[in-house]
Image: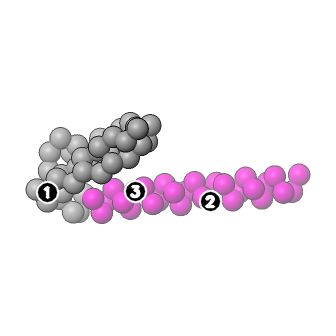
Amino acid sequence: MKMKVSLTLNAKRYDIDVEEDFARFLILQMKQDFNFEGNNDLKLLLQAYVRKNFALYEQEKQALKLIEQIQTL
């Protein structure tokens, strides 16, 4: 089932439809990164984007390290 998630950027509200399970996860993450109930500026959006990409970068490094360790067993 689809669920609507909304965020306000530069005084404009954006609504996106995502699957309900993902929506619950997304809302929790967005509440950590944004003023979920109010307005957010583009600088805050960019900062959140960079933080999330850094986390993905770290996860990829860890995954590659685990793959290497498994291959050497």
For label 2, count other residues whose C-alpha is less than 10 Å away and answer few (under 14), some (14-19) or many (20+). few
Q: Name the residue under label 3.
A: 51
The foreground one among 61 and 16 is: 16
- Under tag 3, what secondary structure? helix
Q: Which contiguous range is marked in magenta? A: 45-73
Q: Mark 3 near mark 1, Cβ–Cβ under 8 Å?
A: no
Q: Quadrant of residue 4?
A: top left
The residue at the point 31 percent across, 60 percent down is 47
- Relative to 67, residue 32 above or below: above
Q: Magenta: predominant secondary structure element?
A: helix
| Percent coordinates x, y for residue 68 in the rendering | 77, 59
Q: Mark 2 near mark 3, Cβ–Cβ under 8 Å?
A: no
Give the label, 2 or 1, closer to the camera.
1
The foreground one among 50 and 25 is: 25
* CA–CA distance in space, label 2 to label 1: 36 Å
The residue at the point 38 percent across, 62 percent down is 50
For label 3, count other residues whose C-alpha is less than 10 Å away and answer few (under 14), some (14-19) or many (20+). few
Q: Mark 1 points at which residue?
A: 12
Q: In which quarter of the image is residue 5?
A: top left
